[in-house]
Amino acid sequence: MSKIKCLVVDDESIAQRIMVNYLNELDNYEVVATCNNAIKANQVLNQQAIDLMFLDIEMPKIKGLAFLKTLAHPPAVIITTAHREFALEGFELDVIDYLLKPISFERFLKALNKFNRKHAASLPVTSPLPAPPTPPEKIIYLKSDRKMLRLKENQIRYIEGMSNYVVVHVQDQKHAVYISLTEIKSKLSANFIRVHKSYIVNKQFVNAYTKEIVDIAGEAIPIGKSFREGIQGF
């Protein structure tokens, strides 16, 4: 996170040092420059971006509030002065706060908290991150009855092993494919789990299960004893 860039404008060197020392106590603030009059402050503002300016009122050449009125796009401003009578005029210029000298660190922090709230409200709202792209549907190709089947993996409910072929149950259809269960399992994603020496099931179609059977879309598929330990849940 970038630091808040600050400009301290005060014709009293002691007052400048107090503001600088206070700001140096805080990690997220950086004093870019200090100036003892408004003319030098104007030069700084024309040369670089300033987030927050601490501005004294009684200064030579141009008084602080008069200088503030000349700025078309002033930074956020906290007035620091020994003169209470200018407070109303300062707030009419939309200053963040009006600090009367001598300024305690506690009062200084209160002013910065006001600035932080206003600064946070002015920041652009971060757009939400775009949703990750939906992965494409996995397609598997299986040879059945002298033709090549193009099957969407997420439509396969379960696969039943026979003596020398398997039956692929796809919704309301069945396809006989001359391939072993082990070989067809290698073509499928981790959504498919072997629950029996003769059955592979698609976890997304599991309705319920016990130690003995798994319900796949209303059909009871047996779970082999040797496969129970490998099934940690669907």
Image (cartoon, grey):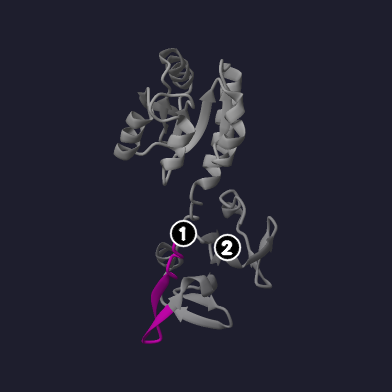
Q: Does the magenta stretch include residue 86?
A: no
Mark nearer the viewer, 2 or 1:
1
Q: Residue furthest bottom?
A: 146
The reply to whether residue 161 is visible in this rendering is no
The reply to whether residue 210 is visible in this rendering is yes
| Residue at disc 1, secondary structure | loop
Residue 91 rendering spot, x and y as whole percentages: 59, 37
- Near-viewer residue (206 or 118): 118
Measuring 57% from the left and 62% from the top, which residue is drawn there? Answer: 203
Q: Which residue lies furthest to the top in this view?
A: 14
Pointer 2 residue: 203
Residue 29 left/right relative to 211: left
Pointer 1 residue: 130
Residue 49 rendering spot, x and y as whole percentages: 36, 39
Numbered badge on residue 185: none
Task: First in sequence, mark 2 or 1: give its number.
Answer: 1
Residue 59 left/right relative to 122: left
- Near-viewer residue (167 or 38): 38
Q: What stretch is highlighted in magenta?
A: 130-150
Residue 7 sits in quarter: top left
Amino acid type of the residue that numbered disc 2 sits on in the rendered structure: Lys
Residue 112 rendering spot, x and y as whole percentages: 55, 29
Measuring 45% from the left and 37% from the top, which residue is drawn there? Answer: 68
Amino acid type of the residue that numbered disc 1 sits on in the rendered structure: Pro
Say few, some or many: other residues with alpha carbon within 10 Å of mark 1 (under 14 / 14 to 19 / 20 or more). Answer: few
Question: From mark 2 to mark 1, how far is it between C-alphas?
Answer: 28 Å
